[in-house]
Image: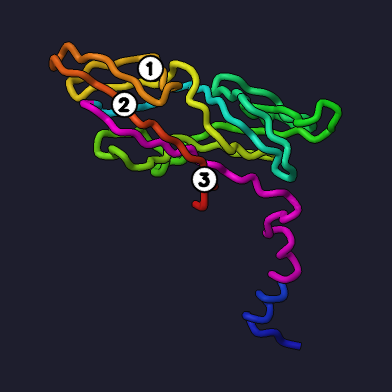
């Protein structure tokens, strides 16, 4: 009995294909992207620090329950229950009696998330991404004084608070006002 090379390869592939296929029983972890936009006055860029914190209102992914004012920080890591060496930046439960954990990880997406620059004035820009399981961020609350603003004159303003959705100061290097006005944000699912 002789086999053609193609038939032989097809038989081998079908016999071992289960070893190469992705495990589709694992749930996908959706990634949500935070976009910001603002009206800039003499501002070169707005960026986040290396270990940012975020405050969201989050909704249970398979439900309607909403928790307001949930903080997630890049500098905090929690081990996921039942896993080895897998950490997340937020681990929580909507119901304290539930066994179901919800998680969130802060991440950047290369060549996608970035700083907000003066060329972006009044346009939405993706600044950070969040990999989520069991929850969805629905509203971003720009609380805290973590933003870093650089003026067109080169002066760096650290710990800028955008909770009022606007900010202004003075650049003594160029002797001119600087400001961020009409700050807005939105959250969308990353489609890659």
- Which of the labelled discs sits on residue 188, or is there none? 3
Residue identified by numbered label 2: 180
The answer to which of 139 and 158 lies nearer the viewer is 139
Is-magenta flag for residue 79? no
Residue shown at the point (38%, 40%) measured from the top left: 125
Question: What is the residue that sits farthest to the bottom in this orientation?
Answer: 1
Q: Bin the neighbour count of mark 1 within 10 Å (Cα to Cα): few under 14, some 14-19, many 20 and up.
A: some
The answer to which of 127 and 2 lies nearer the viewer is 127
Q: Nearer the viewer, mark 3 or mark 2?
A: 2
Contact check, label 2 and label 1, Cβ < 8 Å = yes
Residue shown at the point (51%, 41%) measured from the top left: 187
- First in sequence, mark 3 or 1: give its number: 1
| Above or below, 115 relative to 15 | above
Is-magenta flag for residue 17? yes
- First in sequence, mark 3 or 2: give its number: 2
Query: Going by the image, does 184 lie left or right of 40?
Result: right
Residue identified by numbered label 1: 160
Alpha carbon of mark 3 to alpha carbon of mark 2: how far? 23 Å
Query: Going by the image, does 79 lie left or right of 100?
Result: left
| Above or below, 21 relative to 76 | below
Of helix, strand and loop, which one carries label 1? Answer: strand
The region drawn magenta spans 13-42
The answer to which of 16 and 54 lies nearer the viewer is 54
Alpha carbon of mark 2 to alpha carbon of mark 1: how far? 10 Å
Q: Nearer the viewer, mark 2 or mark 1?
A: 2
- First in sequence, mark 2 or 1: give its number: 1
Q: Bin the neighbour count of mark 2 within 10 Å (Cα to Cα): few under 14, some 14-19, many 20 and up.
A: many
Using the rendered image of the protein, determine whether residue 49 is visible from the camera's viewpoint.
no
Query: Going by the image, does 82 lie left or right of 165?
Result: right
């Amino acid at each position: 009995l002789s086999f053609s090379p193609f038939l032989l390869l097809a038989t081998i592939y079908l016999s071992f294909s289960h070893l190469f296929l992705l495990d589709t029983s694992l749930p996908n972890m959706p990634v949500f992207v935070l976009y910001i936009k603002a009206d800039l006055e003499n501002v070169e860029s707005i960026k986040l620090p290396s270990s940012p914190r975020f405050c969201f209102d989050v909704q249970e992914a398979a439900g309607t329950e909403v928790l307001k004012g949930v903080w997630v920080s890049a500098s905090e890591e929690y081990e996921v229950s039942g896993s080895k060496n897998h950490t997340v930046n937020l681990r929580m439960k909507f119901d304290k009696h539930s066994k179901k954990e919800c998680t969130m990880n802060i991440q950047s997406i290369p060549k996608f998330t970035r700083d907000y620059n003066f060329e972006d004035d009044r346009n939405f820009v993706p600044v950070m991404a969040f990999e989520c399981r069991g929850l969805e961020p629905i509203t971003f609350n720009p609380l805290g004084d973590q933003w870093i603003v650089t003026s067109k004159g080169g002066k760096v303003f650290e710990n800028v608070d955008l909770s009022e959705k606007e900010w202004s100061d003075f650049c003594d290097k160029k002797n001119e006002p600087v400001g961020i006005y009409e700050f807005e944000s939105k959250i969308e699912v990353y489609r890659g």
